[in-house]
């Protein structure tokens, strides 16, 4: 009797699994939302409010710079160049910013990290979010956790940075991207 019950259960589960697999194949790929919150110009206006002008500089990493950055981060950089934005107020530097693309669950999250002349985060602004869930990372409630952080500060989720329920992968991506931006800004002095 038990053998027949186990066999019947196995057949039912096999049929359910097969039906689920066929349904998954028949469904189109999950659609992703792309929400543009800020353009490059609008993000720069927020980051450098009160500045007379902003300059963009593209920097190609030297092998030495790239090695130092990768050593500090503990992972490889995929890019060989970076664009910096420098704000000026009456020809005096007023901080720098960098735009980062970091992969969330499937798609990149584009955001700007603005630091003071001393290398402390002043603001983080999500510019484009491309996932169906987790967009809470764009809210000030989350991004203000990074204010005052430097390249030397640890940024461990659930220790230094509070996680957001339902947005864990986006939180991880943002935290890694902000750390990467800070280390790049700390190593490259233009």
Image (spheres, rainbow, N blue to C red):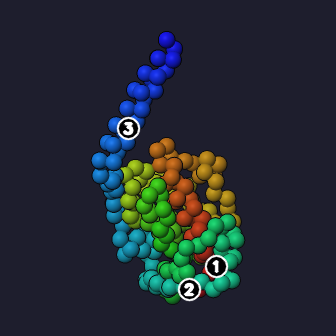
For image coordinates 37% across by 42% down, the residue present is 21
For image coordinates 49% across by 64% down, the residue present is 102
- Front in this rendered view, residue 133 or 15: 15
Question: Percent from the top left, x then y, of residue 54?
Answer: 45, 82
Q: Secondary structure at mark 1?
A: helix
Above or below, comparing residue 41 to residue 111 in the picture: below
For image coordinates 42% across by 27% down, the residue present is 11
Q: Earlier in the sequence, mark 1 or mark 2?
A: 2
Q: Earlier in the sequence, mark 1 or mark 3?
A: 3
**Mark 1, residues whose alpha carbon is within 10 Å: few (<14), some, or many (≥20)?**
many
**Mark 3, residues whose alpha carbon is within 10 Å: few (<14), some, or many (≥20)?**
few
Are discs 1 and 3 less than 8 Å apart at CB? no
Quick one: which residue is furthest to the bottom in this view?
Answer: 91
- Front in this rendered view, residue 12 or 125: 12
Cα separation, mark 3 vs mark 2, equals 52 Å
Above or below, comparing residue 158 to residue 41 in the picture: above
Q: Which residue is mark 2?
A: 60
Are discs 1 and 2 less than 8 Å apart at CB? no
Circle number at residue 66 = 1
- Front in this rendered view, residue 15 or 116: 15
Question: Percent from the top left, x then y, of residue 38?
Answer: 36, 67
Question: Percent from the top left, x then y, of residue 23?
Answer: 32, 42
Quick one: which residue is furthest to the top in this view?
Answer: 1
């Amino acid at each position: 009797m038990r053998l027949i019950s186990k066999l019947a259960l196995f057949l039912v589960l096999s049929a359910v699994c097969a039906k689920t697999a066929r349904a998954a194949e028949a469904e189109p790929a999950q659609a992703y939302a792309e929400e543009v919150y800020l353009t490059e110009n609008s993000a720069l206006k927020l980051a450098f409010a009160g500045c007379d002008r902003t300059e963009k500089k593209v920097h190609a990493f030297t092998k030495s710079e790239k090695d130092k950055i990768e050593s500090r981060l503990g992972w490889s950089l995929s890019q060989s160049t970076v664009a910096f934005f420098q704000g000026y107020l009456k020809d005096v530097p007023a901080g720098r910013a960098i735009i980062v693309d970091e992969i969330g669950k499937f798609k990149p999250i584009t955001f700007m990290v603005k630091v003071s002349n001393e290398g402390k985060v002043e603001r983080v602004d999500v510019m484009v979010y491309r996932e169906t869930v987790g967009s809470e990372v764009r809210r000030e409630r989350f991004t203000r956790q990074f204010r005052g952080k430097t390249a030397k500060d640890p940024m461990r989720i659930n220790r230094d940075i509070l996680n957001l329920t339902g947005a864990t992968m986006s939180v991880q991506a943002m935290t890694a991207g902000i750390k990467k931006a800070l280390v790049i800004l700390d190593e490259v002095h233009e």
